[in-house]
Image (cartoon, rainbow, N blue to C red):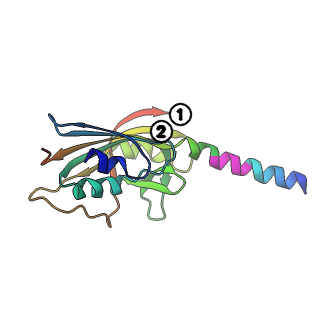
């Protein structure tokens, strides 16, 4: 039972860790009509 | 506009250059920033967004129709506009490889000032592959 839980936890880590490193780093806009 | 954009979710800092009409947005690391919402907020503050470019790190995905995407958060991804660079990333779909890319998310259609249609998902047109790891 414990081994199953550890396996599931490891699988979740494999999926979630890379996604947590994913991110929008920078956004740049060119705008018109700004005074 | 700076204050209006700065109040949007996931925005850490906004720098506005009046001379060349550039607006630089630094996101927080919470992944809450929504580019479509930023476009809407820009319009609401009384100016027109002509272009929006984004640098992002994420995983390449492929949907059921075969469209490639860049997943930048568990609940946020952008469809990739087909071009040579996006085609080159197709082999990474479904893998754990992370890529950092620069691309254009929005370009104003020719003509008059138009309200940004936030119901249409933004497509990312990649023009630079910065990193692949």
- Magenta segment range? A11-16
Q: Which residue is mark 1?
A: B133
Quadrant of the image occupied by residue B101: top left
Residue that numbered label 2 is attached to:
B99
Q: Position of residue B62 (x, y in %)?
A: 48, 56
Q: As drawn, is B67 to the left or to the right of A14? A: left
Magenta stretch: includes residue A12: yes
Dominant secondary structure, magenta: helix
The percent position of residue B18, horizontal first and vertical second, equals 17, 37
> How far, Cα to Cα, is label 1 from label 2?
6 Å
Farthest residue toward the bottom? Answer: B119
> In this rendering, does residue B10 appear at all?
yes
Q: Residues within 10 Å of mark 1 (few under 14, many from 20)?
A: few
Do the numbered discs 1 and 2 sit on residues whose CB atoms are within 8 Å? yes
- Quadrant where the N terminus of chain A sits is bottom right
User: How far across and how far down the image is residue A26, in percent?
Assistant: 38, 39
Label 2 secondary element = strand
Which structural element holds mark 1?
A: loop
């Amino acid at each position: 039972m414990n081994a199953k839980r550890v396996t599931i936890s490891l699988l979740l880590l494999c999926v979630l860790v890379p996604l947590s490193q994913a991110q929008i780093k920078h956004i740049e806009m060119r705008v018109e009509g700004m005074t | 506009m700076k204050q209006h954009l700065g109040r949007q979710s996931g925005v850490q800092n906004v720098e506005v250059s009046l001379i060349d009409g550039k607006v630089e947005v630094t996101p927080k690391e919470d992944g809450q920033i929504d580019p479509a919402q930023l476009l809407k907020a820009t319009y609401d503050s009384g100016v027109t967004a002509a272009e929006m470019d984004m640098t992002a790190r994420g995983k390449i995905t492929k949907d059921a129709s075969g469209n490639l995407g860049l997943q930048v958060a568990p609940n946020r991804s952008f469809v990739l506009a087909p071009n040579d660079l996006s085609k080159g990333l197709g082999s990474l779909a479904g893998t754990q490889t992370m890529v950092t890319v620069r691309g254009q998310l929005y370009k104003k259609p020719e003509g008059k000032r138009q309200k940004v249609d936030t119901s249409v998902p933004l497509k990312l047109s990649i023009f630079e592959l910065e990193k692949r790891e």
